[in-house]
Amino acid sequence: MGKLAPIIVASHQNQKFYFNPDYIALPADVREELRGIAGAAAEQSRGRFSIGFYEDGSVYWEASPEDVAGFDEIEARLVTNQWIDQKQALCNALTLWYRLYCTEEGQTIRKNILDLS
């Protein structure tokens, strides 16, 4: 199962983040929550932290090294797993959002629901 471009990437080294404009339709409060998570996780892992979708709509969380000393792959995995555990409801909501708004099947479901009203 392949990864799609991430929703958001935060950099510990640059103290910046990138939000993918393809996902600007996500609710503003969700975008802000993702920004906070990615920033905190990048800081904790001392690397780059990404949150994105797999092709099936499930969510991935990934820490990766940057050109800074201090990145520990084991610690980064622990940080990633802690965030996944803490934010399982968010993961589920993102998966549902992706399937409803970014897939043909979701567009059909939304159209059918609107036709019923």
Image (cartoon, helix red, strand yellow):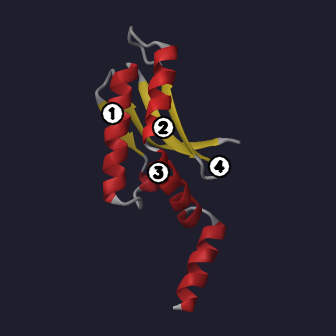
Residue drawn at x 47%, y 21% as measured from the top left: 76
Which residue is disc 4 drawn over?
55
Give the residue at mark 1.
39
Badge 2 amino acid: Asp
Q: Residues within 10 Å of mark 1 (few under 14, many from 20)?
A: many
Secondary element type, mark 4: loop
Q: Taking 74 as reference, is 116 above or below it?
A: below
Around disc 2, counting alpha carbons within 10 Å, would you say few (fewer than 14), some (14 to 19), or many (20 or more)? few
Label 1 vs label 3, nearer the camera:
3
Which dot, 4 or 2, sits closer to the camera? Answer: 2
* Dot 1 and dot 4 residues touching (CB under 8 Å): no
Residue occupied by mark 2: 85
Residue at left 43%, top 35%?
Answer: 83
**Can you name the residue that lies furthest to the right here?**
1
Q: Which comes sooner in the sequence, label 4 or label 2?
A: 4
CA distance separating discs 1 and 4:
24 Å
Q: Answer with mark 1 or mark 4, whichever residue precedes in sequence.
A: 1
Tag 3 or tag 1, which sits nearer the N-term? Answer: 1
Q: Amino acid at mark 3?
A: Ala
**Residue 4 position in % (x across, y down):** 59, 45
What residue sits right under mark 3 in the picture?
Answer: 89
Tag in front: 2 or 1: 2
Rounded to the nearest angstrom, the CA distance separating label 4 from label 2 is 22 Å
Give the residue at x 67% y 41%: 2
Secondary structure state at the residue bearing disc 3: helix
Camera-side residue: 15 or 32?
32
Instruction: Give the SS element for disc 2.
Output: helix
Viewer-proximal residue among 41 and 4: 41
Residue depicted at x 37% and y 33%: 10
